[in-house]
Each structure stands twice: as structure tokens, then as C-alpha cells.
Image: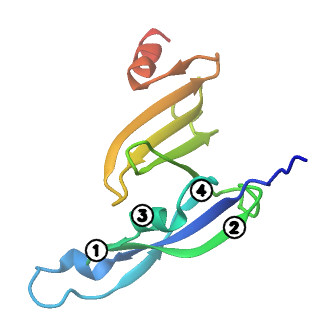
Amino acid sequence: MTTTTTPRFVQIFTQLRENYGAHDWDGVGNCPQRWKNKTGSVYILGPDVDVDKFTGSIEYADNYFEEFVAFVEETTEPYSGLEAWDTPLIISPSPKGGFFMELFQEAEFSSLRKGIKSKKTVTEIDQNGKHLSATVEYCMEDGQTLDREGLNEYFKVA
């Protein structure tokens, strides 16, 4: 008998806040508190990502900014319930014990440069949220896949 299990995905929605009071603060005494909510992020974690470990790597707070988990949703469909404007980061474990965060963007580049169809950014962070590396890949309308240097060459020729 064969048993199949449906993959589990976790959607994490964060809230980013900026303390406008800190911009004029001279560092003496208590920092003024004038927090303003900003747009947070949406993360989609695959079945092999430790949710608690990941949230610990993205939450932070200081006198100027804070990002915290607003809510978590477990689902069998990774993109279910997302709004059209959401641009989720896809999370997978990295071999170094941290995480890869993959961001895929399309249809935003035609006003900048003709020929770019989409852009994929992969950032690796450690378990403390420190950025270890980042790569960017551009998918062109003619089918080519280029890194940043290749993109520069492409537009020198075009």
C-alpha cells in the first residue's frame, strides 16, 4: 500500500515599522517614539523549512526599525490567499544552516529597459538574518538568461 502526503507550506506575513522619532534623535536619553507602519513581507516556506528558526532569522528591532511576524498561515497551496500585489519570497534551507530567499519579479521592467521579461534574486542569509550572498538573474524576452554583467553587455549591443 502506498501512502501519499500533501506537501505543507507555511505563509509568513510580517509587519515593518519605522520610528520617525529616531531620525532627529541625538543619541542622548530616550529615543523619541513616533512609529509608522510600513509594508511588510510575505514569505512562503517549503515543507523542509523550520518555521521557528526562520522567523528568528527575520525578526529584528532597534530604535529605528522593527520587523515582526504579524501572522502565519499553513496551507497545501503555496500561493493561496495572496493578493495580486503580493510579491512573496520563496524560502528554502541552505547547506550552511541558514536560508535561501528567492524573489521573482516580472512585468515591472518594460518601462526601464525593453527586453527584460523577469528578474530573479536569490539571497542567502544565516540563522541570525545576516546576508551571506546574493545573485541576480535576468530572463530576457528573447529567451536568454543573464547575470548583471551579461545584462550590461546585452544593452551595450542592443
| Residue at left offset 41%, top offset 26% | 148
Question: Is residue 70 shown above or below 123?
Answer: below
Asked if residue 119 shows in the view, the reply is: yes
- Numbered tag placed on residue 74 in the rendering: 2
Rate crowding at label 4 as few (under 14), some (14 to 19) or many (20 or more) other CA atoms within 10 Å.
many
User: Which structural element holds mark 4?
Assistant: strand
User: Which structural element holds mark 3?
Assistant: helix
**Residue at mark 1:** 64
**Residue at mark 3:** 58
Instruction: Say whether disc 1 or disc 3 marks the residue closer to the N-terminus.
Output: 3
Amino acid on which disc 3 is placed: Ile
**Residue at mark 4:** 45
User: Which structural element holds mark 1?
Assistant: loop
Instruction: Say whether disc 3 or disc 2 marks the residue closer to the N-terminus.
Output: 3
Q: Nearer the viewer, mark 3 or mark 2?
A: 2
In the rendered structure, the answer to whether residue 79 lies left or right of residue 155 reads right
What whole-number distance in Å separates the C-alpha atoms at marks 1 and 3? 16 Å
Q: Residue 80's x, y, as percent?
A: 76, 60
Asked if residue 114 shows in the view, the reply is: no
Question: Is residue 44 shown above or below 156?
Answer: below
What whole-number distance in Å separates the C-alpha atoms at marks 4 and 3? 13 Å
Amino acid on which disc 4 is placed: Leu
